[in-house]
Amino acid sequence: MTFAYFYPMGNLFERPRGTRDFDTISMQKRRFVEERMRKTFESFGYEEVLTPTLENLDLFTAKSGEGVIGEMYAFKDRGGRSLALRPEITTSVVRFYVNELQQKPRPLKLFYFGNCFRYDRPQKARYREFWQAGCELIGADTPEAHAELIALGMTLLKDAGLKQLDLRIGHLKILNRMIAQLGLSEAEKRPLLRLIDKQDLAGLKKECERAGISKAKIERFIEFLNCKELKKIESFIKLDSGDKEDALDAKTELEKVLKYLEYFGIKDWKVDFKIARNLDYYTGLVFEIDAPKLGAEKQLCGGGVYGLAKLFGGKEVPQAGFAIGFDRTVLTLEAERYDFEAKRKTNYYVVPISEELVSHAISVGMRLRNKGEKVVIELSRRKPNRAFEHANTLGARWVIIIGKKEVKKGVVSIKDMLTGEQKEVNQESM
């Protein structure tokens, strides 16, 4: 008796659609990029956390509603519990914060790496399983702290080796003020926000016409969206009556953020009020970083100011953060012949004695960061004694004091936190 064995044509088992296998060379690249980013996060004083890939479904529907379920991998387990593979990580980190970290000294600077899942149509640079790098800043709400957050996003990508980056910055309170002038209902606003975020001004115009908005108002709104000069924004905000104070305050805040960005070495940016951030929880300052080489799917980083802690049962607290598309970053690095090189870093804590000395502290801190050192700059306006306490909490080896006397002499005072010794060092030698 003979036995015939039949083998199927092609692969017997294929990976699920929208997922990928990574060979050894790909993994070497990915691990190098991850390590480079991890060192940059740490150089800004951020610490790593890890949350579950699997979460309760209501964590994601609490803010975005039931409609988001169609975009997710959601299911019931054997116990009848509604679960989901996380579509992003910010929500998980905030849940973690509310449950276990609220008593920690603030601001909390947390970063993460992890895989996420969305039930989306796979295409170039867009997958159903994808990886994110990101961070959350919890407990700081000053323009200088938000400027450092944006600077961190740019520095992460630059330190990874990227050469071509476009930074765009906007503010949702200003955008919302202009949308309010259109006189739309909440239901009518949603499709507009999606079109704005996609930069689809032709589609936006048609949607406004469909909603019965006058031609003059439509043209004025599109002119606002295309405006790149903050000086002109105030005239748009004041165009008609209504509550405009929030938008005017937001303009002032944005001006301060842009000013502080220069001290962090970030001088190339564009004001862009077409950043609508389709994630419902963003509330204020928003920004995006693009890689022009990726074409239509060029966005590498997106983030801003948000508020989720109270929704999840925690105390209201300032929150901001961003996420980086790790896969897209690697794709861009490959196109730009990415160079991997680890950097040695040390731990400094820079303390400005007063608000007017913040810019000097930023300059000293950034000079050290550019040398590969790990640096935390005091940006929450703590008094010196509280700043020293916080430096101890972070385990800082050296504290650099920036006072009026030091600035006048062109020096900084450095205290060794292990020995207690303090000495003056020429600022230019840092």
Image (cartoon, grey):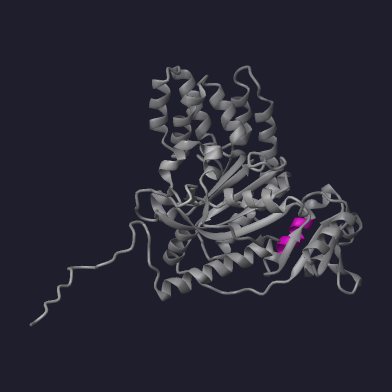
Q: What is the x, y in percent for residue 31?
A: 51, 71
**Which picture quadrant has residue 284?**
top right
In the image, 241 versus 61, the foreground residue is 61
Quarter of the image containing the C terminus?
Answer: bottom right
Would residue 324 be found to the left or right of residue 205 on screen?
right
Residue shown at 63% from the left, 22% from the top: 238
Q: What is the x, y in percent for residue 226?
A: 50, 34
Residue closest to the far left: 1
Q: How many labels sit on residues?
A: 0
Quarter of the image containing the N terminus?
Answer: bottom left
Q: Is residue 412 visible?
A: yes
Residue shown at 38% from the left, 31% from the top: 203
Q: Check the image and report above or below for 137 versus 210.
A: below
Q: What is the x, y in percent for residue 9?
A: 17, 68
Would residue 316 be found to the left or right of residue 26 on screen?
right
Q: Check the image and report above or below for 10 versus 95.
A: below
Q: Is residue 269 visible?
A: no
**Which picture quadrant has residue 401?**
bottom right
In the image, 309 versus 285, the foreground residue is 309
Q: Which residues are magenta?
A: 361-367
Residue shown at 46% from the left, 51% from the top: 77
**Which picture quadrant has residue 304?**
top right
The overriding secondary structure of the stretch rendered in magenta is: helix
Q: What is the x, y in percent for residue 262?
A: 67, 51
Q: Check the image and report above or below for 181 versus 143.
A: above
Would residue 411 be found to the left or right of residue 99 on screen?
right
Asked if the stretch drawn in magenta spans residue 290, the answer is no
In the image, 31 versus 163, the foreground residue is 31
